[in-house]
Image: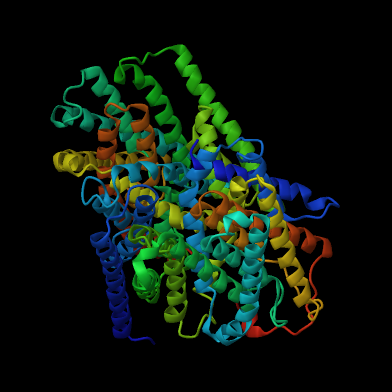
Amino acid sequence: VTPAIPETSSARRATLLQVGALLGACLVYASVGHIAPIPEGPAMLLVSVGLMLVAGLLASRILGTLGLPHLTGYLLVGAIMGPHATGVANEHAVEQLASVNGMALALIALAGGAELRIDDVRARLRSLAASTLTHGTIGVVLPAAVFLAITPFVPFTRDLAWPARFALAALWGVLAISRSPAATLAVIKQSGARGPISRFVLTFVMSSDVTVVIAVALTMTVARPWLTPEGTFSVAAMMEVGRELVGSVSIGTTLGLLLGIYLRTVGRHVGIVLFVLGFVAADIIRFLHFDPVLTFLTAGLVITNLMERGHELIDAVDATGGVVYVVFFATAGAHLDLPLVGQLWPAALLLCAGRLLATWLGHAAGASLARDPIPVRRWGWTGLVSQAGLTLGLAVLIARAFPSFGPAFQSLVVVTVAVNEVIGPVLFKLTLDRVDKRIAGEQPAASP
Amino acid sequence: MSVLPLLLGLLVLAYVGSALGEGSAAPRAPVAGYLGLGFLAGPHGLGFIDALTVEAFDPIARAGLGWLAFTHGVAAPARQASRTWHQLPISLAFAATAAVVGAAVSRLTVPSSGGLQPAALLGLAAVGALASSRFTDGHAPPTRFSPVRLGGGLVGFALLDLMFVVHVVPADDGPLALAARVAVPAALGLALGVTIVAARRAGLEPIELRAMCIGTTAIAIATSMALGVPAITTAFVLGLTLRHLAEPDHGRDRATYDPIVGGRAAVVLPMVVLAGLALPLPDSRPDLVLTGVVVLALVAFDRLLRRGQPGRWRPPQSEAALSLGFAAALQLEGEMGQVVLLVAAGFAVVTDVSFERRGPPVVVAPVDPVAAEAPL
């Protein structure tokens, strides 16, 4: 039996080495910067990416020893490096790194789709339908109401007219029902839980991705006339959204079939193919006015359910995403307008509390309606708190669509996502460790 | 569209092209194919991509070359060091052939110009050194890394570094400045290497290790650029430090090696396409003659040495030679850079096509388990 003391000592040694490595990298950068400042252009871009990767990875591991998720480390490093704090990565470099967003979103959506099995959806159809209904109502309306209530106190909304505030609150409400497929998967994998709570949360989070993406696209179209002076609402605009959604699903199906055939027949250089898809295909899809998130989500769905190559795809996404996610989240952190955060934190806390309440109420109502097992009814909501890449990605889309207030709105989203990402995985892991694993142990032959 | 999606789009085209050609009877030459596609799309071909856009690829090329140098450092385990040293004379002989023939031809064809400048000769020598990687010592299987391949890489990268130093350092700076430009990147690589070793020993997962290596190499390249010293040495020493300090058993568990070097193709192929984009048509007869003679000299030297080693030859490392040629072309303005790139491309195409025609090489010697540990 391995004694506990050496394990603790080994973990302490590892943490010390990580802290040492982090300080070493910063020292090298600071020493060189002292002798010769990093010039603008390629060197600045390279050093930004390099430090985001090195410091992000090390910080996430150091914070991991405190039970905090990796994402928090990436966001923190990005915020410290960003133009609003130390300025190691200046505005130009951060702008150039925005091209990673498309890639990261494509990977997140592909993995999310690939995790969604139609059989699982069919087995839990009643439960999923009830939860979708209650989260789609309570989960949207309550956070939207909280947002609306605080608009007079938020700097970028206080001068808006009331219709615009309603429109923005609706967007906030829809964003509030987005979850984090990546965080959900990571916590389930880490805990090794296979009980009813983990299975419900996984299926619901993956299937609700599709709902959220469609809901955000629809809400943006409906809200646009109130949010931009030149925006108008018409039936044609709704038809355009319909075209966008149907087109995205069609392209995603085709892409999924092609990628599935590639995985079956060739199967090599999958990482490079994903890299190309993320950069080139995402650009083309956006150019054609289709939704890249929905497209890649559908592609992942097709690969798992029609081509049965989901595991290969998920492995390849994990390998490629290891680098891309760090830069993506760190860049999101670098966008964090810290002076604005200083003004927004009370609002962000209120919004987080509102969302938490809405998640709990929405889940309790949905699970009761569907007569889910008691543990799912009581504790299922803990798996629905995390928010991460998908929410940040959707916030990027909103910021691009509404440049006048978009960046400030995005900052508010980043702050609330950071809070949800800190508390969400911790709550979910506690539930899985203390409830789900125990139930799974009592019912080893539980139905899948 | 920005330059990265453009490059990736070209790669897809090249990849699809090579996949379509897989079933045909025509000899396949992947490197020549990727190079040809880049040339066709570039400013000297059909002109889909203009010269300014090609210049915008500079940071990608620098990062790619830095990563190649880093992987070369990581791929140099101490167990093979003595055999690598034994093969260095072959690589040096190839380098000398390329430089001497280049100097002689340039003096003969344009006597008034005084021949190629030292920087260009060093660039040619670097390309020549990598041409030597065609040989194996008969122990390593042909599809794997061998000491010769490492030796060629070592000499090639060192010569390219020297070319940068000679080209950048003003002549009146003296030997001290020259020495500093070699010592500073080595110290920088060592310092960053120690950092990454600490992280490695803290138990990073393979995916995290790869991300960490990419990040540290990017810092190495950027800080070298800021200090005005060659990034190749920094990145190479970084890789060497990681391999030798992180794994006291010198890579027997391959935990450091595989996640890093396994993805080489993802860097090498874009570099070959980029080299094709920058590839010029020889705009004067002397350039054409110089290119042709140097390539022929390298091929002849290659054949001469190979006469004693039937069946032991291997695919040339023409993609690495091309990467070096492209890096040289970016550094050496005008004709000098063009000549180096043309020679690299000429040698790559000739050896690539000839290798594909001959089919897969035959291994006559037993596989050395130590050498077999280090795959390409």
Asked where in the image residue B122 lies, by quadrant, the reply is bottom right
Q: In which quarter of the image is the C terminus of chain B?
A: bottom right
Q: Which residue is at 81% across, 55% downward?
A: B27
Looking at the image, which is closer to me, A255 or B153? B153
Asked where in the image residue A175 lies, by quadrant, the reply is top left
Q: Is residue A22 visible?
A: yes
**Where in the figure is residue B276, as x and y percent of width and height?**
63, 48
B333 horizontally vs B283: left or right: left
A256 horizontally vs A383: left or right: right
Q: Which residue is at 27% across, 52% downward?
A: A88
Marks counted in the figure total: 0
Q: Is residue A270 visible?
A: no
**Where in the figure is residue A99, as x and y percent of width and height?**
43, 42
Scheme by which the image is coloured? rainbow
Looking at the image, which is closer to me, A328 or A224? A328
**Where in the figure is residue B1, as x and y percent of width and height?**
50, 35
Q: Which residue is at 31% across, 83% downward?
A: A4
Looking at the image, which is closer to me, B91 or B110? B110
Farthest residue, direction right: B25
Looking at the image, which is closer to me, A446 or A223? A223
**Where in the figure is residue A219, as x and y percent of width and height?**
38, 25
Q: Which residue is at 28% across, 77% downward?
A: A12
Farthest residue, direction front: B112
A221 horizontally vs B154: left or right: left
